[in-house]
Image (cartoon, rainbow, N blue to C red):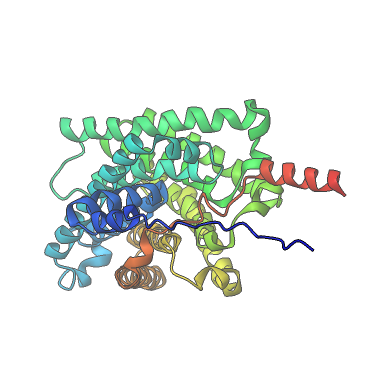
Amino acid sequence: MESLEIPRQEVHIKVDDSLSTTKERNTDLPHAKPIVLMSVLSSLHAGYFRISLSLCSQALLWKIMIVPHSLSMSHLQSSLPSMAFHLLWYLALSTQLSLCVLYALKCFFFFDLVKEEFSHYIGVNYLYAPSISWLILLQSAPVMEPQSVLYQTLFSVFALPVLALDTKLYGQWFTTKKRFLSMMANPASQVSVIANLVAARGAAEIGWMECALCLFSLGMVHYLVIFVTLYQRLPGGKNFPTKLRPVFFLFFAAPAMGSLAWNSICGSFDPLAKMLFFLSLFIFMSLVCRPNLFKKAMKRFNVAWWAYSFPITFLALDSVQYAQDVKDQVASGMMLIFSSISVLIFLGMMVLTAANSNRLLRRDPVLGSAASPKDKQRSSRLGAATC
């Protein structure tokens, strides 16, 4: 038998040093800074304006509480110095400016992500948040008068994006087939309502009553439509991520801001303002009595936790206006309770945010884990077809 010879093959191993050189290049600090900035910009979205919105609303609360002619708060003026209010306002201003600069850079470098956010059924609502923060910051300004030209100019600049988004969002709810409100409604949809009501309050402070009534009517009519739609538990509300359940606090934030806006329009806390205040108070108590609703959302820190802060601050603002009108012990007690809760939650969120700063700019579930209703319907149809 002839012996079988197995041909020999030589294997040459070549070590590529490109990976090691790349790592060495990335560890260089001047080259690492742009990478970190791009990572921050890609993770940033309009939902982070909840932080500045909480700061601005807290500044407005402190401004109202230290007003010299506030009879119901005269016994607290010594313990609420104006210096603390000024520090809080400038902190809110710096935070708002920082977020706006970062989001503007995101629009420049990651415009596709901004378009994705604009077309998302949850993310689009938070595009109102920058305008809301600026409008509340303007209303809480310590030195600027509403009758000044600068105040009116800034108000017009900050209110125009609200009207532009109203035209886009509200129009597609009854004209675009795939974006009917019955399919796209979710608790975050009430951010648009709050934007119109905050703008209405600002217009009333200036004295533009016709503009204030227009914005108030837009906000309250759409609040009723959204509230009834969500109350019926239609498909849109079933696609809301569990991690975003703190946004449920917007249910009482909208009527509370509506009460504040109507108080500014009428100049007094009349029965309609009181009705909206009592409605927000009832919804707040209904949510507080159901802590299991928020249990899963509290497992890990998320920027959505800031949705606890500013709605309670709106309710505290409403309770202050109510106490100033009624002037009895019950109203004063409610004012102290809600104001204290608002300040404590705000301080707690500041501490938690500082303690979890490493998790602050991670990918948020606003766009990641929240599939739109039409996507879920498409996947269910595909699954039924394959069975």
Farthest front residue?
1
Residue 270 visible: no
Task: In the rendered view, tell whether residue 283 sits above or below residue 258.
Answer: below
Tell me what residue is drawn at x 55 percent, y 56 percent: 9
Instruction: Depth check: give the residue in front, 166 or 144.
Output: 166
In the foreground, 56 or 328: 56
Residue 362 appears in view = yes
Name the residue furthest right. Answer: 387
Tell me which residue sits at (45%, 47%) in the image: 258
Q: How many marks?
A: 0
- Quadrant the N terminus occupies: bottom right
x and y, in percent, of residue 298 in the image: 50, 71
Decide if residue 347 is on the left or right side of residue 195: left
Q: Is residue 331 above or below residue 229?
A: below
- At x 22%, y 57%, the residue is 63
Q: Where in the figure is residue 105, as x and y percent of width and height? A: 29, 40
Residue 241 location (% of width, % of height): 59, 57
Residue drawn at x 21%, y 38% as measured from the top left: 146
Q: Position of residue 159 (x, y in %)?
A: 34, 33
Residue at the outermost top position: 175
